[in-house]
Image (tube, rainbow, N blue to C red):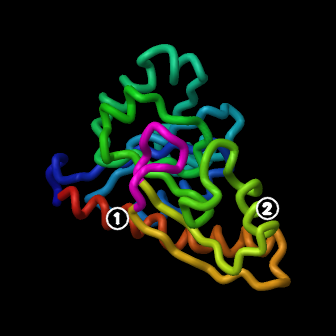
Amino acid sequence: MNSANSTKKIIIFASGQGSNAKKIIEYFQDRNDVKIAHVLSNNIRANVLKMAHDFEISALHFDRTAFYDTHEVLHVLKDAEPDLIVLAGFLWMMPTEIINEFENKIINIHPALLPKYGGKGMYGNHVHQAVLENKETESGITIHYVNEKYDEGEVIAQFETKITPDDSMETLKKKIQQLEHEHFPKVIDQLLSKKA
């Protein structure tokens, strides 16, 4: 496992605090066979950039122009040759050219059991609120491949949690976050071992 070619590379995209990104980085930090090549964010004030820096991982910020109107971000990705691109709380739609270039190599995590509560604008608290308003008895997370439509790519894995009548937005959010932190790094690990 010491040849550079056997090291699997991950690139993480995140827009905010980066709690999932942190769990992924911690999960792989003592591994020689997996490397987090870059953490990219569209939000210059995102905590995830500072956090990546603290772990001595390359942290890059980009704007809408670099992402959608030029090939800047695409070039960064191509140069890095990632085995997997992981969207961990990243809110922008992936450009078609990046999806085409990295077919079946881009995954996302969604805080509900898709196909329910997916689509544009359905992220974070918006999802939990809708789930609670509809009096669902369970929610969960969906890890899926990314295609050209929000939350419609092929499902890789789903994990459920029960919702009790006394659950609030905060308690549901905590339950979902626990599922994310527990399962997302493991599913990434499984996907990488399949790509061996």
Q: What kind of residue is marked 1? A: Asp
Magenta residues, start to end: 145-155
Amino acid at pointer 2: Gln
Label 2 crowd (10 A; few <14 / some 14-19 / many >=20) = some
On whether residue 148 falls in the magenta region, the answer is yes
Relative vertical location of residue 26 with respect to residue 21 in this rendering, above or below: below
Residue 162 shown left or right of residue 80 in the figure? right
Q: Which residue is drawn at 59% across and 36% down?
A: 92
* Pointer 2 with pointer 1, Cβ within 8 A: no
Residue 117 spot, x, y in % from top left: 64, 58
Q: Position of residue 196 (x, y in %)?
A: 18, 58
Q: Which mark identifies residue 189? A: 1
At a point 30% along the width and 32% down the height, the residue shown is 101
State the residue position of label 2.
Answer: 129
How crowded is the residue under tag 1: few (<14 C-alpha within 10 Å), some, or many (20+)? some
Q: Which of marks 2 and 1 is nearer the N terminus?
A: 2
The overriding secondary structure of the stretch rendered in magenta is: loop
Residue 183 in percent (x, y) is at 48, 71
